[in-house]
């Protein structure tokens, strides 16, 4: 492991945001699996619509993040995206990861029905999001960040939903470029892989606002 401090850029998610993300993924799978309409779903929609209207009064009118030159503006708070984005945003997959060294990381992922493309399989676009997510996690755990220059993905076999899958990351830094290769496996079968090249960012991260009280 690198001796550098892991990167953080943004505020920590609220516990309620983490609960929301988990419940939304579960309910999405249930709603997509319904055979017929249901009064339960009608009731849920009513609750969500009322919550949407009430939450509109609690968030800023301007929805840009309070970062960089806009750090003191009237925009919204920015939650740290360095790692575990799916823990608070249901649009992103969740995973486990172990950073073994600067050169290697590994982990597991299980894609729920919300990410379905072909019947019973993960949409390829979500696989690209997943690869980008875990590469960023690996880099930020080592205290570095980079601007992506290239991202290539190869699909070998359909990736099944609702199955524990393993992934492996290998990484090297040459000439201020971070090159990462990720492999997603089901047992010994390679499902897909991706290679990313990112230019190391040497300047300090832009300012990012804290949560406002009250």
Image (cartoon, rainbow, N blue to C red):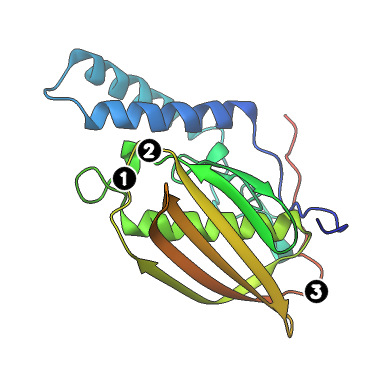
Q: Where is 20 relative to 10, above or below?
A: above
Residue 159 located left or right of residue 88: left
**In this orientation, does residue 134 appear?**
yes
* Residue furthest out toward the front: 188
Q: Name the one closer to the observer, 5 or 99.
A: 99
Q: What residue does disc 3 label?
A: 203
* Real-space CA distance between mark 2 and mark 3, rounded to the nearest whole angstrom: 41 Å
Residue 168 position within the rendered picture, expressed as x and y whole percent measured from the top left = 56, 56
Give me the residue at 40% from left, 33% from top.
Answer: 25
Residue 189 position within the rendered picture, expressed as x and y whole percent measured from the top left = 38, 54
Per the image, label 2 sits on a secondary structure element best described as loop
* Real-space CA distance between mark 1 and mark 3, rounded to the nearest whole angstrom: 41 Å
Quarter of the figure with residue 41: top left
Query: Residue 160 has which mark?
Result: 1
Give me the residue at 69% from left, 72% from top.
Answer: 172
Residue 59 located left or right of residue 137: left
Q: What residue does disc 2 label?
A: 163
Badge nearest the viewer, 1 or 3: 1
Q: Name the one closer to the observer, 177 or 45.
A: 177
Badge nearest the viewer, 2 or 3: 2
Query: Residue 77 has which mark?
Result: none
- Quick one: quadrant of the C terminus? top right
């Amino acid at each position: 492991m690198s001796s550098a401090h892991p990167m953080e850029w943004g505020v920590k998610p609220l516990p309620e945001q983490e609960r929301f993300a988990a419940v939304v993924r579960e309910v999405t799978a249930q709603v997509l699996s319904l055979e017929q309409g249901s009064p339960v779903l009608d009731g849920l929609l009513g609750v969500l619509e009322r919550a949407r209207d009430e939450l509109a009064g609690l968030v800023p009118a301007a929805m840009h993040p309070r970062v960089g030159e806009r750090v003191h503006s009237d925009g919204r708070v920015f939650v740290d995206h360095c790692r575990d984005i799916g823990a608070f945003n249901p649009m992103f997959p969740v995973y486990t990861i172990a950073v073994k060294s600067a050169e290697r990381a590994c982990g597991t992922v299980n894609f729920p029905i919300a990410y379905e493309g072909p019947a019973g399989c993960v949409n390829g676009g979500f696989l690209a999001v997943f690869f980008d997510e875990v590469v960023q996690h690996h880099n930020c755990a080592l205290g570095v960040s980079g601007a992506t220059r290239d991202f290539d993905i190869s699909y070998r076999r359909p990736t099944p939903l609702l199955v524990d899958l393993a992934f492996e990351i290998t990484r090297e830094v040459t000439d201020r470029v971070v090159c990462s290769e990720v492999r997603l496996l089901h047992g010994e079968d390679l499902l897909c892989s991706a290679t990313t090249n990112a230019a190391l960012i040497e300047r300090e991260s832009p300012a990012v606002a804290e949560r406002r009280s009250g």
